[in-house]
Amino acid sequence: MLLRLMLPRQREFDGAITINRWYEAKSGNFWRDHTSTPQKFEKFKSDMGDRLKIATKNGATYELHSNTPIPKDVKEFLNKKGIKYFEY
């Protein structure tokens, strides 16, 4: 289920597991493509931070699901932000 919230900066979520548990899903070459430069990694972190704030403001948790291994520096960022992640 795609979850779209209309806010000053529109953000989409890949879905919701329950009404209060929202998630983002990553697959394929996402990690290679979005962490290949410091600028791309900063954009990823900014996007994740925005989604975390939106979810929290709406009484939901926010988590990341990936069907490919999550790089160590990404895991460190997610841990720092308190974003749960799952690798499949």
Image (cartoon, helix red, strand yellow):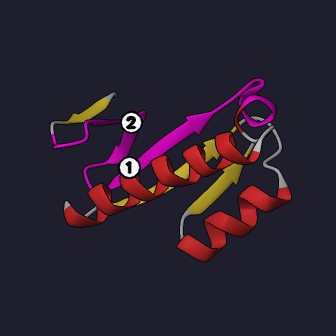
**Residue 7 at x, y percent in the picture:** 16, 43
Q: Is residue 60 left or right of residue 8?
A: right
Q: Earlier in the sequence, mark 1 or mark 2?
A: 2
Q: Tell me which corner region of the image, top left, top right, bottom left or bottom right, holds residue 9.
A: top left
Residue type for callout 2 = Gly
C-beta proximity under 8 Å, tags 1 and 2: yes
- Residue at position x 56%, y 36% from top? 25
Quadrant holding the N terminus: top left
Please give the residue where the numbered disc 1 appears in the rendered image: 22
Asked whether residue 58 is drawn in magenta, I would say no
Dot 1 amino acid type: Trp
Residue 4's x, y, as percent?
25, 33
The residues colored magenta run 7-33
Q: CA distance from mark 1 to mark 2?
A: 6 Å
For the C terminus, the image quarter is: top right
Task: Kindly identify which residue carries mark 2.
Answer: 15
Residue at image coords 73%, 68%:
76
Above or below for 64 versus 34: below
